[in-house]
Amino acid sequence: MAELCLGRQRYNSLHLGILLTVFVLVFFGYGFLSHRSQEFGDSEAVSRKTHAQPNVLTPSREDVLVLTPWLAPIIWEGTFNIDILNEQFRLKNTTIGLTVFAIKKYVVFLKLFLETAEQHFMVGHKVIYYVFTDRPAEVPQVPLGAGRKLAVLTVRNYSRWQDVSMHRMEMISHFSERRFLHEVDYLVCADVDMKFQDHVGVEILSALFGTLHPGFYRSSREAFTYERRPKSRAYIPRDEGDFYYMGAFFGGSVVDVHHLTKACHQAMVEDQANGIEAVWHDESHLNKYLLSHKPTKVLSPEYMWDQQLLGWPSVMRKLRYVAVPKNHQAIRNR
């Protein structure tokens, strides 16, 4: 009996010791983990933001198409939460490159382009402006925000504006492989004779994106101004086509943009050898490429608009990247 009582005492002492040990480990372990999470940065805690819960039965927009048949989102105002997206891309430490060609007299548009980009383009993220120009001395000095840089890339000009336009694909392809791939995560390729009028941010970023042409977003494919001559590498038959994309605003990952621009340049070289030039030059070849290589995001005409020609229809809740009024004949070929 004495041995049994002694055994029970030892058992109770051992049990109490285990409980005390567990308590100490839990208490101090929690403090240690809390300290470590603060020291190294708890990514979940950092990224946690309060936002409205998505409602599966309530569509974000009912007046426009928000998803392509191949399940790529079409980006309109009201279809995304920019706070959530900003945090996701900041956690990835994303750097965005913006290419723009300021050739010959088009350099006059560069100051407004850069100033409005600083106000509206990828605000809060790291950006490198890649300015292609034949007039580096005329590139304006525009104050840039923290984490934003400008790189001037000197290139030759061409006698015809069509050649300037078509050689953009060659230059973007060349620099993507030799430079951009090592400096940025995404490339956005834009026309210079435009201005940013409202927010254009990371909601556009994807492996490959194109922008709906403001003149054709309501049109049937038969009305699209695709290249219709079978002799051209840009040829698209009248019973084919998804959308008509604008050549003035496209982009994606550096690798995907390199593939696109290289393919378009090679197709234009082949056309030239065969004595044909696509009806809308590089834009025609862009549309052919995006027909067979579906974009992973499509931007609505909010991201490419001409208010002077098209007004401001109610379906456009915001006009983000817009044309600057100009006299084309006074600028082209000069």
Image (cartoon, helix red, strand yellow):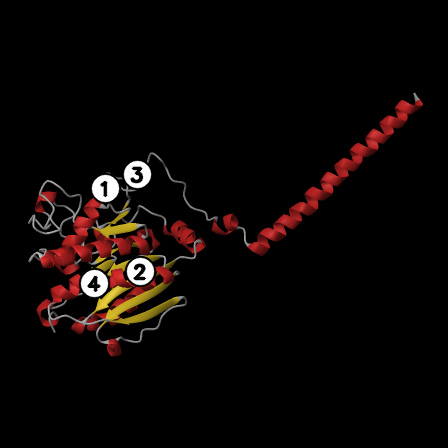
Determine the image quadrant of residue 2.
Answer: top right
Is residue 332 visible in the rendered image? The answer is: yes
Crowd tier of the residue under label 2, counting other residues whose Cα lies within 10 Å: few below 14, some 14–19, many 20 or above:
some
Q: Which residue is mark 3?
A: 59
Please state which of the two labelled residues, at mark 2 or mark 3, is closer to the viewer: 2
Q: Residue at x 69, y 44 (%)?
A: 27
Picture disc at residue 168: 4
Please state which of the two labelled residues, at mark 4 or mark 1, is closer to the viewer: 4
| Image coordinates for residue 76, horizontal then vertical, percent | 27, 48
Q: Is 312 left, or right, of 48 in this rendering?
A: left
| Image coordinates for residue 302, horizontal then vertical, percent | 23, 53
Q: Amino acid at mark 3?
A: Pro
Residue that lies at the very extreme toward the front in this rendered image: 273
| Image coordinates for residue 238, horizontal then vertical, percent | 8, 43
Crowd tier of the residue under label 3, counting other residues whose Cα lies within 10 Å: few below 14, some 14–19, many 20 or above:
few
Q: Is residue 1 above or below residue 76?
A: above
Please state which of the two labelled residues, at mark 4 or mark 3, is closer to the viewer: 4
Q: CA distance from mark 4 to mark 1?
A: 31 Å
Q: Is residue 187 above or below residue 220?
A: below
Q: CA distance from mark 1 to mark 2?
A: 35 Å
Q: Which residue is mark 2?
A: 177
Among the two numbered marks 2 and 4 on one chain, the one whose residue lies closer to the N terminus: 4
Q: Which residue is mark 1?
A: 65
Residue that lies at the very extreme toward the right in this rendered image: 2
Among the two numbered marks 4 and 1 on one chain, the one whose residue lies closer to the N terminus: 1
Q: Quadrant of the C terminus?
A: bottom left
Task: Pick whichever, 226 or 163, lies toward us.
Answer: 163
Residue that lies at the very extreme toward the top in this rendered image: 1
Picture disc at residue 225: none
Q: Is 138 left, or right, of 14 in this rendering?
A: left
